[in-house]
Image: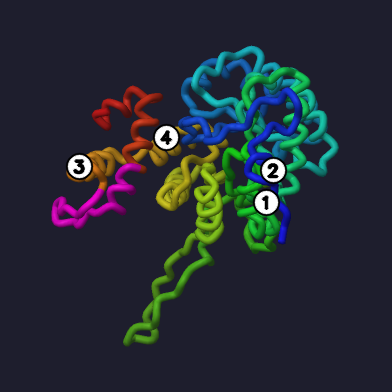
């Protein structure tokens, strides 16, 4: 049997003077995690405009940042954190992975300079709970040293075969866990999948319809979702531990329809957001991860028809009971979180 901490120790700070871990995640709207390269001067100049348009801004230090720009990206992130007021928009960073030469300085320099402004550290290539424990302890020591008042959360990227195997232990590893994102590009490589894409489907991953009476007639092929299994496994692990699951990146910026479809499948399966790597993906994520107005209206009717959430009623010929009441509550609760941040959506929902 694997040894785990007692419940009391699990919720105790890991360093004297570090803040108490959260017992439940703060309620925040995180429909899109918008990635920016922090060493880019043009991006820095436009941040003031960008911040109110997104739910989360993430300064990326890992993949896509060239090796000779790693320090510039780290310093750029510290500058962007200092120079801007983020309001209700989350401030995250994706640090380099734990076996890289940059990560120790990423963590030490960022927490010591702007630890009080940082909401979440995204940790790539997490393979097991040991990776979370290491970062958890180090963050606690640095929070204590620099008198950071609010615990910095950890968001794991699920992007190795070993990480997927250990997903439940990763979710359970610490009260500092915020959630997880699917990392389809690294995961494809780690698993030996035969693709060259960042997320989305593949035309060859399809089921062929049975032959009809005319054996020579062409047979339909139905493309399947390559990520269905992993997203389902990640959603179960996250929700079992009160964490938030996310779809990750979609690399074909020109194919807005495919991006929307992939995000929507993830939303319907339980995910709360996705990454936006290009400004065009911000609107897609906003649309997909805000519940549909007609679904919200129907969900409100269910809640109104069953004030205490028990029994059974018929609405428009459809049976409703305690379980559909709970589904309706998920949708209306999310709509309220969206409405609190987004006045336009508040009007659409009538909330
Ligand atoms: C994201 O980091 C990915 O590898 O897909
Ligand atoms: Mg990756």
Give neighbour class at mark 4: few <14, some 14-19, many 20+ (Cα, 10 Å).
some
In the image, the residue with mark 2 has its CB under 8 Å from the nearest atom of ligand 2: yes
Which numbered circle lies on residue 124? 2
- Please name the residue that numbered disc 1 is placed on: 186
Residue 77: name its quadrant: top right
Badge 2 element: loop
State the count of labels. 4
Whole-number angstrom distance, CA of label 1 to CA of label 4:
25 Å
Relative side of 321 to 173, left or right:
left
Is 114 part of what is drawn in magenta?
no
Numbered range of the magenta stretch: 310-329
Whole-number angstrom distance, CA of label 2 to CA of label 4:
24 Å
Closer to the eye: label 4 or 3: 3
Instruction: Give the mark nearest the N terminus, 1 or 4.
Output: 1
Give neighbour class at mark 2: few <14, some 14-19, many 20+ (Cα, 10 Å).
many
Write the residue at 46% across / 72% down.
207
């Amino acid at each position: 049997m694997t040894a785990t901490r007692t419940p009391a120790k699990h919720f105790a700070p890991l360093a004297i003077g570090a803040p108490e871990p959260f017992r439940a995640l703060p309620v925040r709207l995180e429909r899109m995690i918008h990635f920016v390269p922090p060493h880019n001067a043009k991006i820095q100049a436009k941040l003031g405009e960008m911040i109110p348009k997104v739910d989360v801004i993430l300064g990326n230090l890992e993949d896509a940042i060239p090796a000779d720009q790693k320090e510039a990206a780290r310093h750029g992130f510290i500058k962007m954190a200092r120079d801007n007021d983020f309001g209700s928009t989350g401030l995250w960073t994706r640090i380099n992975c734990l076996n890289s030469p940059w990560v120790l300085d990423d963590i030490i320099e960022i927490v010591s300079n702007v630890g009080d402004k940082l909401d979440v550290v995204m940790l790539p290539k997490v393979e097991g709970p040991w990776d979370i424990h290491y970062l958890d302890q180090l963050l606690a020591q640095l929070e204590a040293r620099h008198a950071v008042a609010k615990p910095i959360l950890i968001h794991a990227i699920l992007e190795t075969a070993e990480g997927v195997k250990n997903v439940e232990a990763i979710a359970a590893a610490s009260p500092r866990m915020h959630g997880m994102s699917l990392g389809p590009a690294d995961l494809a490589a780690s698993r030996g999948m035969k693709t060259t894409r960042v997320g989305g489907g593949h035309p060859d991953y399809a089921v062929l319809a049975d032959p009809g009476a005319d054996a020579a007639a062409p047979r339909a092929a139905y493309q399947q979702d390559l990520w269905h299994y992993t997203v389902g496994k990640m959603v179960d692990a996250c929700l079992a531990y009160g964490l938030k699951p996310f779809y990750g990146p979609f690399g074909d910026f020109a194919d807005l329809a495919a991006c929307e479809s992939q995000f929507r499948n993830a939303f319907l399966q339980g995910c709360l957001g996705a990454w936006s790597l290009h400004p065009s993906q911000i609107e897609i994520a906003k649309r997909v991860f805000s519940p549909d107005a007609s679904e919200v209206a129907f969900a409100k009717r269910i809640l109104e028809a069953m004030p205490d959430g028990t029994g059974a009623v018929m609405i428009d010929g459809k049976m409703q009971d305690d379980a559909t009441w709970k589904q309706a509550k998920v949708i209306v609760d999310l709509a309220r979180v969206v409405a609190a941040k987004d006045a336009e959506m508040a009007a659409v929902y009538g909330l």
